[in-house]
Image (cartoon, rainbow, N blue to C red):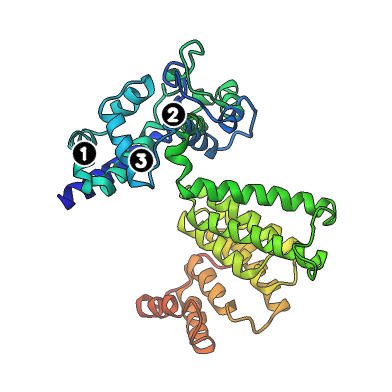
Amino acid sequence: MAQKARDLKQNLYADMQTLLQEPKLYNQERFAGMNLSPNTIAELTTKPKPEYMALIRLNRDLLFSAWPNVSLNEEDDMLILAERLRQPATPLDKYVVSHLSGTTRKLLATFTAENNQQLATFRTTLLSGLNKVLKEDNLYDAVKDKANNKVKLSTSTQHRIDENFFGDSVRRPELNRAILSDAYPASIALEPREEAYRAAQRLSDWWERINESKGAEVQPNHRNQTREEALQQNRETAALLLQQAAQRCVVRAEIIQASNHLLILKQDDPAVLDEIAESCLQYADFQTLRGITQQSVERKPSSPELRAVLALACLLQNDLQEGKRQILILEKIAPNFEDIPYLYNRLYQMAKNTDKAREYAQKYVQTAPQGRYVKEMNKFLTAATPTTATQPLK
């Protein structure tokens, strides 16, 4: 029975994740009778920038409103959701069920309050099914009929509809996500990733306003706290939430955006940049890494840590000349900086000069025996064989 519960969780999760990318999740018929949140209505009626993430967020917001009594994090709410999908009564319910995999539907048929050992499996499988629906072209059709649609769409969701997100393969997941968020608000509202991200965004916006007013809006929390201390405390709170958002958001664009806000709040803290670099490297998003780091270097040109990350970002984009230029600048700023041999190793690896790459790998291991790249350099030294450079650097 435990295995069956795990299977249901996995299948539902996969289907729900796909549903979030549904290009036309929202239409009036599908969301008829559903009380969409003001935020989702705002998303449908406002005109945001054409970002890839917009459709996924919109679909998620629509699901929030469509399933107001369901939470994918609470067992009791999951039982309610299971019963609702087993006997779909609304156009949206039927649409979601139709996009669940055969395995998910079979697991759903045997999932009951009396057999709630399957709860964890059901949660995962359902989320996967919803995310699968996000990729569909006709999700918007389910809620576009205003006469029969009972889902109250947010302004931002309506904006995306007005901007024809459902006709754009890149932006449609954002619209679908907002539609689902409006339709099933509680189902997704208790999911921590979006809440963490939105909280981070609100704090980021607040911090920008504080900067513009030079802290005029900041008030001490107690008598012994100065205005500057209160400002710093709020700033650290914002940074913490942004950091949580960066770590918990499942979508790459959200991770990068939250990390970028965090980087600004932390005044180009190298430790924060390392977190951003890790996220970018995880998704092979070297362009974003380079762009964020370039901005940081412009604000703090004398920081060796920031310069080192920028050099690495250039190398990862196969821009060897710019990467080498940044390494040379780094050598002038901090001649004994630990990562310089590592950067040269990466440079000459990409230039296919194994001899020079080995030389710098050996130097790094000798000068930084506890460095973060020691294992990588030792692995390279074990595998590398001397060759002649085929792409000499000028």
Q: Nearer the viewer, mark 1 or mark 3?
A: 3
Closer to the N terminus: mark 1 or mark 3? 3
Compute the Cα span from label 2 to label 3.
Answer: 14 Å
Q: Mark 3 sits on what residue?
A: 77
Residue wearing tag 1: 111
Q: Nearer the viewer, residue 44 or 329?
A: 44
Q: Are marks 1 and 3 in contact (CB under 8 Å)?
A: no
Disc 2, SS: helix
* Mark 2 residue crowding within 10 angstroms, few (<14) / some (14–19) / many (20+): many
Q: Residue at x 79, y 58 (%)?
A: 219
At 49% from the left and 16% from the top, the residue drawn is: 144
What amino acid does circle 3 point to?
Answer: Asp
The residue labelled by disc 2 is: 66
Of callouts 2 and 1, the N-terminal one: 2
Where residue 285 sits: x, y (%)? 52, 53
Q: Amino acid at mark 1?
A: Phe
- Residue 117 in view in this figure: yes
Q: Hey, which quadrant is residue 187 in on the image?
A: top left
Q: Is residue 335 left or right of residue 176?
A: right
Residue type at mark 2 is Ala
